[in-house]
Amino acid sequence: MPEGIIMKALAGFYYVRDQDQVTQCRARGVFRKQKKSPLVGDYVLYEAENKTDGYIMDIYERKNELVRPPIANVDQALLVFSAKQPEFSPLLLDKFLVHIEYNDITPVIAISKADLLQAEERIQLEETATYYKKIGYDVLFSSIERDDDPMALLPWLEEKVTVIAGQSGVGKSSILNVIIPEAEIETNEISSHLNRGKHTTRHVELIEVGNGLVADTPGFSSLDFIGMEAEDLRFCFPEFIELMDGCKFRGCLHDKEPKCAVKAAVESGVIQSSRYENYIQFLTDIQNQKRRY
């Protein structure tokens, strides 16, 4: 039985690539009974009499999966945040990082529209970027106004399945159009009233970029902490993990517990106070969510 990877899902059809051939498939009814739907990125077994009339017979085990956007087996997430228009949001960036870390996906931070910054603003943003680099994240700067800049992303995409995420209107589709001109991905202008853009992609699709695959998605439509426990959150902040053994209490949530090594690191300036504040906000959100449900 042939096997392949689902490259696109649209209107109940799944487009399975097997080497150089793409076959349009439907999902077997058994998946509905199992309450398991095929996802873009799934490696599957399929049967087909021709290129437009196939059926997905089985789905290989996934190493991870996202719900919104619906995609599986992602290696890394390119988190695109703008320096301006819309304004750079460390809170939203940290929220994305938590979701990516929780799903065992490697994040790469790309800051777009850096060419719009004044000199002092640029220095401040570079200080923020230096901190994220210090705790282990790769941070790249990209400007769509300089056509060669997005091309510097290409080496990061090789041999990986990459999902592009971030604020709406930050230039995700524009970056893809520079890297893959033939894709002609639709883009919209930023709304001056809302200070954000509109989602222009309506389905999930994997696009070949060199020897890698990039997911063009409608974006993360929800960043709720559904399924995440308060105990999980601390492992999504890499600078906390290094200090956990120094906490007095095993299982310390780094909140109200005494003799907490993480809180001590915040007070001494080793851990950025804004990152810790975001952690406490997320922790509260998770705890309140648990009470509601």
Image (cartoon, rainbow, N blue to C red):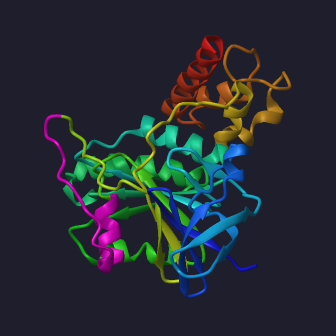
Compared to 177, does 10 lie above or below?
Answer: above
Which residue is at a point 60% across and 38% down the rendered structure image? 270
Horizontal arrangement in the rendering, residue 8 relative to residue 74 (left or right): left
| Residue found at the very far bottom of the displayed protein | 20
Nearer-the-camera pick, 11 or 110 = 11
Quarter of the picture containing the N terminus is bottom right
Which residue is at a point 81% across and 32% down the rendered structure image? 246
Tell whether position 35 is magenta. Answer: no
Which residue is at a point 58% across and 40% down the rendered structure image? 98
Location of residue 269 in the rendering, given as x and y in whole percent from the top left corner? 56, 33
Nearer-the-camera pick, 233 or 241 = 233
Nearer-the-camera pick, 14 or 148 = 14
The magenta region covers 172-193
Compared to 252, does 201 lie above or below?
Answer: below
| Residue found at the very far left of the displayed protein | 192
Location of residue 182 in the rendering, given as x and y in whole percent from the top left corner? 31, 80
Q: Image quarter for residue 262?
A: top right
Location of residue 52 in the rendering, given as x and y in whole percent from the top left corner? 50, 76
Horizontal arrangement in the rendering, residue 36 relative to residue 189 (left or right): right
Tell whether position 192 is magenta. Answer: yes
Compared to 67, does 176 lie above or below?
Answer: below
Nearer-the-camera pick, 19 or 259 = 19
